[in-house]
Image (tube, rainbow, N blue to C red):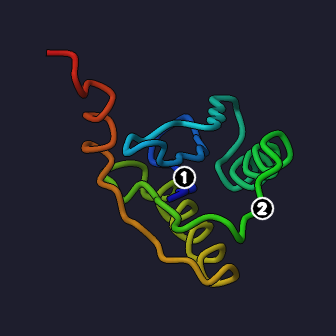
Amino acid sequence: MRILALDSSGLAASVAVVEEDKGEAVTVAEYTVNYKKTHSQTLLPMLDEIVKMTELDLDEIDGIGVAAGPGSFTGLRIGSATAKGLGLALGKPLIAVPTLEGLACNLWGTV
């Protein structure tokens, strides 16, 4: 399974590709930008760069994960609209990920 993930809920924007390898999730690529541009200017160029660097065919992804909030209202709208457009164009399902749950996953296995 291969998931394309978009996060535009905060000041930084992130795009990542995650694959399942032997039953475990492995981050194949991640691109995060926190620079004076809006998410509408950064998300698609970041996705394009990941696709080029990993030689990813977007038809091979199984779903698109998108940060669902809480977060910046405008940022969430940009991320959701980008994910929805990609999902419709590629015929792939969207997966809403609550922002706080996504952040909490960074601590998985630390206790």
Above or below: residue 53 compared with residue 93: above
Give neighbour class at mark 2: few <14, some 14-19, many 20+ (Cα, 10 Å). few
Above or below: residue 25 compared with residue 64: above
Q: Position of residue 94 (x, y in %)?
A: 46, 72
Locate residue 36: give its quadrant: top right
Asked whether the residues under the numbered discs 2 and 1 touch, taking CB atoms below 8 Å apart as contact, a structural biologist would say no
Q: In the displayed image of the protein, which residue is found farthest to the top?
A: 111
Question: Tag 2, which secondary structure?
Answer: loop
The number of discs equals: 2
Locate residue 90: give its quadrant: bottom right
Q: Is residue 22 left or right of residue 97?
A: right
Residue occupying image coordinates x 29% and y 54%: 98
Residue labelled with disc 1 = 6
Q: In the displayed image of the protein, which residue is found farthest to the front?
A: 22
Residue labelled with disc 2 = 57
Question: Tag 1, which secondary structure?
Answer: strand
Quadrant holding the C terminus: top left
Distance from disc 2 to disc 1, alpha carbons, whole Å, reads 17 Å
Of the residues shown, which amino acid type is indicated by label 1?
Leu
Of the residues shown, which amino acid type is indicated by label 2?
Asp
Q: Is residue 69 left or right of residue 75?
A: left
Q: Is residue 23 left or right of residue 44?
A: left
Residue occupying image coordinates x 75% and y 55%: 44
Give neighbour class at mark 1: few <14, some 14-19, many 20+ (Cα, 10 Å). many
Residue occupying image coordinates x 69% and y 51%: 43
Q: Position of residue 4 (x, y in %)?
A: 57, 56
Q: Position of residue 41 (x, y in %)?
A: 75, 51
Q: Position of residue 13 (x, y in %)?
A: 58, 41
Q: Reading the chain from its start, which is encountered first: label 2 or label 1? A: 1
Q: Nearer the viewer, residue 25 or 84?
A: 25
| Mark nearer the viewer, 2 or 1 | 2
